[in-house]
Image: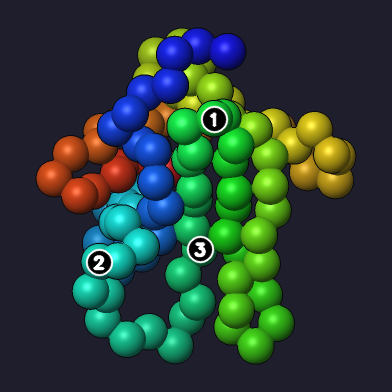
Amino acid sequence: MSETPPDIIGVWLHSYEEDTETAALYRPQHYPFRPSRRPRRGLEFRADGTFVELLPGPADRPREVTGRWQRWEDGRVRVSFPEGGRTPYELAVLSCADGVLRIAR
């Protein structure tokens, strides 16, 4: 596994109101989001390579899907799910600065 990039470590919630045509925006979990009827998806990148995808679950509580992540080429992050059940995928990290994680759509 490649060296862990410290800039994306943490829990990020989708700030869908701020999405653009080319990027999905995520903010730290403690960001003061406006109230929303729509549950927020989330991504957690842990320094040990653990990845947790937070998906809408029953009663609007997040459902955690655990996998692994690693730095890939050209700012990409590869996510896999060794326990099976989910297809691996890549995220193209455009930037991570000033409390905003931008991922290509």
Which is more foreground, mark 1 or mark 2?
1
Choose the circle earlier in sequence order: 1 or 2.
Answer: 2
Q: Amino acid at mark 2?
A: Tyr
Q: The residue tagged with tag 3: helix, strand or loop?
A: loop
Placement of 2 over or under 88, stated as above or below: above
Task: List x then y, in percent, for residue 31.
Answer: 25, 66
* Left or right of residue 60: residue 31: left
Residue hosting label 2: 31
Q: Who comes first in sequence, dot 3 or dot 2?
A: 2
Crowdedness near tag 2: few (<14), some (14–19) or many (≥20) residues, C-alpha within 10 Å: few
Please tell me whether mark 3 or mark 2 is closer to you in this view. 2
Secondary element at image label 2: loop
Q: Which residue is mark 3?
A: 41
Q: Residues within 10 Å of mark 1 (few under 14, many from 20)?
A: few
Q: Nearer the viewer, residue 72 or 17?
A: 72
User: Does residue 56 lie above or below 100 as drawn?
Assistant: below
User: Which residue occupies the foreground of this view, 77 or 4?
Assistant: 4
Q: Amino acid at mark 3?
A: Arg
Q: Residue at x 48, y 19 (%)?
A: 71
Q: Residue 14 placed where, x, y %?
A: 40, 60
Q: Position of residue 98 (x, y in %)?
A: 13, 45
Establish if 69 lies above or below 53. Answer: above
Q: Which residue is mark 1?
A: 48
* Label 3 CA crowd tier, 10 Å (few <14, some 14–19, many 20+): some
